[in-house]
Amino acid sequence: MTPIALFILMLSACNGCAPHLGTNNNHSRTDTSPPPDSGDTAETADTSARLPPRCNSLEVEPNDSLDLSQPVTMEEWWCGVFVGTGALGDPEFMNFTTDQPGWLSVAVEASARGSSADAQFLLYDEEGQSVFVYGGLATSDPRIVIPTDTVGQYGVVIAESGYLTGDDYTWALMASQVKAPVQWTFEEAEDNDTTELANPFELGGTVFAKMGTVGDRDWFHVSVPDGLQAVTFTVEAFGSGSPVDIKLHIYEAGVSKKTCYHGVVDYDLDPDCELKVTTSHEYDVLVEDEYDTGSSFNWYTMTIDGVVE
Ligand SMILES: [Ca+2]
Ligand SMILES: [Ca+2]
Ligand SMILES: [Ca+2]
Ligand SMILES: [Ca+2]
């Protein structure tokens, strides 16, 4: 069973509930008490002396279904352990509420803290949007950084990739407000899904955009001046915490010239490519999500610039 199948199974197991936080679980941000039916609260009342390093609070089992999802406070490390002998390991359902729009970071640390666990998580919001978050390029610990336009509740399901459990299979979760990890000069204007609707792009600018829906296609058009040797197209997304894997198709005067999948090194998922300028000065760029996952979590920026001869 793949990790994705595991998550789907876990979510479908809870009374057929969709991945959203229902009214039965409507804890406020300041209410850090466990859900009503989650068992004896004494388990948290007496843990201060036993808190592991760099942990503000501990999970409360059972938290293995949406109904038992545990509210956690933002800006704090919530720590737990994958324990037990269930076929699906020990899923950890947690939730938190943002109190202001802005950028949100959700991070799970395991291997960075010496844990044996290969942690992954599913993040979902009240709209029913969800995203799977795996380890990054330099670490097996998963983290996501996304813009949040509105306040609201988010759910996190943390799981061990092989459903393994044990005393050394620890994890730590923190949701926090962060600064925007990127800068931009303008935002995309949908609908830009065809060449005719391409957003005009000024050389030297940076667009902020999203692969917002399944099937989203973002077209941009740039005219470049005389005297350029090449045009560069640089994406920032996965490397700055976005879950999206972007690819670019570049057209010169309507003719397909290049498809860019990654950066200078193959394992950098963010395209960074260059096209030599020939006789034409008209370029169109089609931005696509490699896996067409489509959600408002899937942000990216793209800079188009010129290389002078
Ligand atoms: Ca646990
Ligand atoms: Ca659990
Ligand atoms: Ca878009
Ligand atoms: Ca679009």
Image (spheres, rainbow, N blue to C red):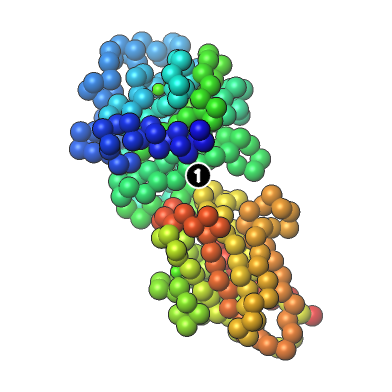
Give the camera-side residue of 43 and 99.
Answer: 43
Q: Quadrant of ligand 4?
A: bottom left
Q: Residue at x 38, y 52 (%)?
A: 148
Amino acid carrying mark 1 in the image: Ile
Cβ of mark 1 under 8 Å from ligand 3: the answer is: no
Residue behind mark 1:
144
Q: x%, y% of residue 282?
A: 62, 85
Give the camera-side residue of 196 and 76.
Answer: 196
In the image, is residue 252 above or below residue 122? Answer: below
Q: x%, y% of residue 66?
A: 31, 31
Residue 118 placement: quadrant: top right
Decide if residue 100 is in sight here: no
In this rendering, position of residue 174 left or right of residue 117: left
Q: Secondary structure at mark 1?
A: strand
Give the camera-side residue of 171 and 93.
Answer: 93
* Badge 1: residue crowd in 10 Å (few <14, some 14–19, many ≥20): many
Decide if residue 246 is in sight here: yes
In this rendering, position of residue 85 left or right of residue 142: left
Q: x%, y% of residue 144?
A: 50, 44
